[in-house]
Amino acid sequence: MKSGCDRQDWPIGVGRRVLAEVDSTNAEAARIAPDLTGPEWILALTQTAARGRRGRPWTNPPGNFAATLVMRPTESPDQVALRSFVGSLAVFDAVVAATGRADGVALKWPNDVLLNGGKLAGILLESAGSSAGLSYFAIGVGVNLAQAPSPDQVEPQALRPVSLLSETGASVTPEAFLDLLAPAYARYEDQFRTYGFAPIRRAWLDRAAKLGQAITARTARESIKGTFETVDASGNLVLTTAKSRHAIPAAEVFF
Ligand SMILES: O=C(O)CCCC[C@@H]1SC[C@@H]2NC(=O)N[C@@H]21
């Protein structure tokens, strides 16, 4: 296992602030965005109103990781949306660096990180602005380092929440995890800016859970059960059924 802080690996030009308590690091990102001079990681040891995807609350017990990277984008909102893949790859690498092993770690579309089949981490991508240009975007990352919420705190069909500590025995502080995550994110961000989505997509698919297997995607309109074929060049989930092929931009996925 890599031992915690390798601060010499911290990416150049990226800020870091650590808060004892905040409502939500994503909310804090929105507040500081107008004054940003460069990308900034905001780490909170406690969140009092953490939010998850689809307007759900996010349970954030002590010792778990809660941080947001906030940046000013230079590209279109479509490109910004692909950062959820960049973020989940970085979380994957940070988990592997923290534990020294990749087996059992997988990615679930669009951006959950799984460990031994349970949900270890989630990402909430938020932004403000218009299709003409975003003023900022924020990648909020929650990782159950020390404690998993109890299954009754998540949706009935959701994957069981797991923690890094209970699944691997690795005890990692939020600060040490950030020191692994920030350089991992910076490496994938560089790759994305230099080569576009193609290598990110390939790396993501290499780590995907249930690729080629039956899954269910629940969109706002319908529930589709099919084979998880791939993720396309726009980040859509591609499902094939006996009758057709669906490219799905937004859905809840169930295994
Ligand atoms: O629903 C999900 O899977 C996404 C959860 C994202 C939680 C993180 S914790 C840090 C950041 N601040 C928030 O309020 N939410 C995200």
Image (cartoon, helix red, strand yellow):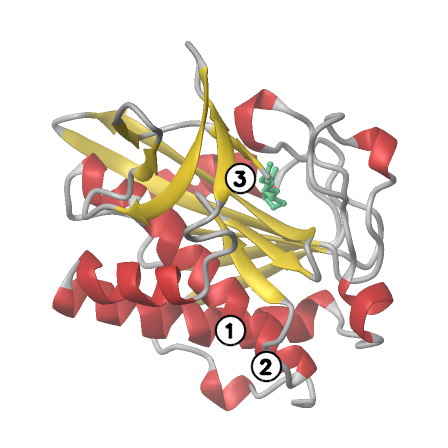
The answer to whether residue 3 of the structure is visible from this angle is yes
Query: In the rendered picture of this protein, how many numbered marks are placed on residues?
Result: 3
Name the amino acid type tagged 2: Ala
- The numbered mark at residue 93 is 1
- 1 and 45: which is toward the camera: 1
Mark 1 surroundings: few (<14), some (14-19) or many (≥20) residues within 10 A: many
Which sits earlier in the primary sequence, circle 3 or circle 2? 3
Quadrant the N terminus occupies = bottom right
Horizontally, residue 136 falls left or right of residue 4, namely left
Secondary structure under badge 1?
Answer: helix
- The numbered mark at residue 146 is none
Q: Name the residue under label 2.
A: 97
Q: Percent from the top left, x then y, of residue 110?
A: 44, 43
Quadrant the C terminus occupies = top right
Q: Name the residue under label 3.
A: 26
Where's ligand 1: which quadrant? top right
Picture residue at 15% right of the left edge, 39% below the top: 76
Secondary structure under badge 2?
Answer: helix
Mark 3 surroundings: few (<14), some (14-19) or many (≥20) residues within 10 A: many
Picture residue at 59% right of the left edge, 69% below the top: 178
Please report contact status of discs 2 and 1: CB closer than 8 Å, yes or no.
Answer: yes
